[in-house]
Amino acid sequence: MRGPGHDRTIRSLILPAVIAAALAGARLPAQTQPLPAGVPAAPPGGVIAAKLPDTNGVHLGMSQDQAVAVMKRLYPPNLTTMTTNKEPDGTTWISHISGQNIQNCTASCDGMDVSLSPPPNPVQVIGINRVINSGSSTPPTVDKVVASLRQKYGQELASVKAPIMTWAYDEQGQPINPQGPSNWSAADCAHAGGFELPGATPLAQILPRLEANLCNRGVFVTVQILPGAAIQGVPVAPQIFMYLGEKSLQFRDGVAAQQYAEAQAAAKQQQQQQEQMKAAQQQKAPTL
């Protein structure tokens, strides 16, 4: 077990290098600082998107360029929106890609919002929200939708009941069955929102809460089937809501982004102090 002085020792060794790099105008490499012990480590070889769940060809773990390419194939340019963020060091990245196949859902429509992780780590897909609406078209039967979902994602978790179906995996795509207290459900974990880092609150203050959140570990898929009026006695599914979340990756990259932001802020503060000291030394001494 690491003692409280361990992290302080690591910071004392790393922070000077971080500050020097920032003062020189260099962009920090991914995960310059070691991640806290409570943050899930990346799988050997990193996250491989092809091993993780997808919907409509967009996989969790995809790179920014891969996700953009698939979304451009799926949706018309005028109905595709990309939200770009800019980091304090000038690095730009796409945080969201949204698209839909038609302007108004008066007929069958399909829309998707893809969330991507922040730098300095490689930007990857961490969440996908998808809505499938039959509109005025004849919807599929509930049984057909359930069978298709099981064929794609495997057997759902038994602890979550219809009309919500949930699956959980590790970061190598193997099914898992996460357990928690009675007031916790894996069905709540897939949503792409999650926590947003970096932010104004220091990482040290929010890390205990993030580490305790069982949803910040694992890969989750949740599908909510909203049944409509039965057709000839057969239940149909006019609306389907799908949520996919790579929560371990989101947690890991969010913490790395916060570490990076805090290191840059510390470097900027030290630079300002050095400039103030230099300016003070250049002033002539007053006549005494």
Image: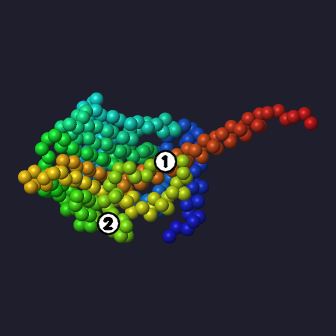
Determine which quarter of the picture holds residue 179.
bottom left
Please determine whether, in this image, residue 135 is positioned above or below residue 191: above
| Label drawn at residue 159 | none
Q: Please name the residue shown 76% across and 37% down the image.
A: 280
Residue 21 percent location from the top left of the image? 55, 42
Residue 266 percent location from the top left of the image? 60, 46
Give the residue type at disc 1.
Pro
Residue furthest to the top: 78
Give the residue type at disc 2.
Pro
Q: Please name the residue shown 25% across and 33% down the image.
A: 103
Determine which quarter of the picture holds residue 271.
top right
- Badge 1, how many Cα within 10 Å: few under 14, some, many 20+? many
Question: Closer to the camera, 56 or 140?
Answer: 140
Q: Please name the residue shown 28% across and 29% down the image.
A: 78
- Label located before the other in sequence (1 or 2): 2
**Residue indicated by mark 2:** 178
Residue furthest to the left: 232
Helix, strand or loop status at disc 1: loop
Callout count:
2
- Badge 2, how many Cα within 10 Å: few under 14, some, many 20+? some
Between the residue at mark 1 and the residue at mark 2, the CA separation in whole angstroms equals 27 Å
Q: Is residue 191 left or right of residue 101?
A: right
Question: Closer to the camera, 29 or 164?
Answer: 164
| Label drawn at residue 198 | 1
User: What is the quadrant of the C terminus in the image?
Assistant: top right
Helix, strand or loop status at disc 2: loop
State whether residue 140 appears in this view.
Answer: yes
